[in-house]
Amino acid sequence: MDISKDLLVAAKAALLDCMALSENESLLIVTDEPLRGIGWAFFGAGKDICSDVSIVEITPRSGHGSEPPEAVAAAMAASDVVVMPASTSFTHTSSRRAACKAGARVATMPGILPETLLRSFNADYEKISRRTHEVSRLLSKASVARLRSPSGSDITIPINGIEAISSTGLIREPGDFGNLPSGEAYLMPREGASEGVVVVDGSMAGIGLLEGGETITLLVDGGFVTGIEGKQAARKLESMLEPFGRPGRNLAELGVGTNHAARVIGAILEDEKVMGTVHVAVGNNISMGGTVDVKVHLDGIIFAPTLELDGKPLLLDGELKL
């Protein structure tokens, strides 16, 4: 397969700078047909670093959070470094958790576009890491978050006792995992406690950019989405969640983007990392320490948010206050 030199250079930077891949380690790339080109870029870049490089192409999964085949899950757990450029996300899967428990370093790249790969690995990830850890520190010590936005979001999210997770883009220690590119601090809300309205106006996982003024309104009661309002995108989200019943409507995540190089382009992998945005997700939260284990996890991006932690703004009209 003919892969551009620029993609190979970007993939090599990701493997060396973000994953710290060394010559005596094994690298596994898991991809699918829509992202085959990106997968082979990582294969080519990996061969320049270490001799034990494998690539496997699987049939596209049914949605974000669906598991890879069992044989692939076993290969993941037997590898030192796993890179997963695929059309769906494996971040919140038991196979990813098992691989990390076995000591693998895992980078998931759901829906990554060539432009994202080329743009994102020119960013200063040491700076992104410091910013992300500080946001996580502030989230972890807070008791209540209140999220508002010009599009109509107004929700109170209890987070007391919840430890935030720093997805820095630096996946260098055994058992580490995260998205690449990255740059977000996130946590699960306290289960069954969030109340209010979330209006997604940026993009939605599985749907893409929300354009022409379209929004998706999530009515949240007792920590679950009890109503979805809007037009075509809202109806699509409703149909995507319908097979998973009430667990699929769990308010699973509150996240803050910390990557200054990221742009909202309609690919959730990059969109949720954009500094100055907040995202919420519904579905699986078990990877964040929760109890809801369902094969769906969908994030929605909110523009120009004001996010207060115990009454003090962390973001004010989309500006991060650190």
Image: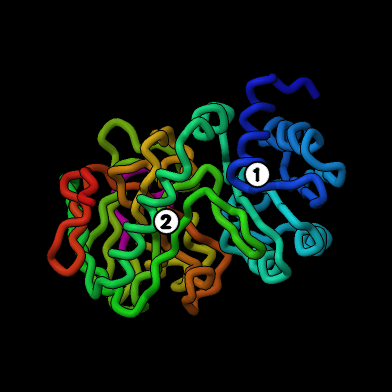
Q: Residues in magenta? A: 227-237
Q: Earlier in the sequence, mark 2 or mark 1?
A: 1
Pick the residue in front: 254 or 45: 45
From the viewer's perspective, is 282 left or right of 99?
Answer: left
Residue 232 percent coordinates (x, y): 37, 42
Q: Is the image coloured rainbow, by chain, by secondary structure, or in one colour?
A: rainbow
From the viewer's perspective, is 186 left or right of 64?
Answer: left
From the viewer's perspective, is 115 left or right of 278?
Answer: right
Residue shown at the point (35%, 38%) measured from the top left: 210
Pick the residue in front: 28 or 63: 28
Question: Is 275 inside the magenta-drawn segment?
Answer: no
Q: Quadrant of residue 253?
A: bottom left
Residue at the disc numbered 1? 86
Q: How far apart are marks 2 and 1 (CA)?
A: 24 Å
Q: Residue furthest right?
A: 51
Residue at the disc numbered 2? 238
Amino acid on which the number 1 mark rests in the picture: Ala
Q: In which quarter of the image is the N terminus?
A: top right
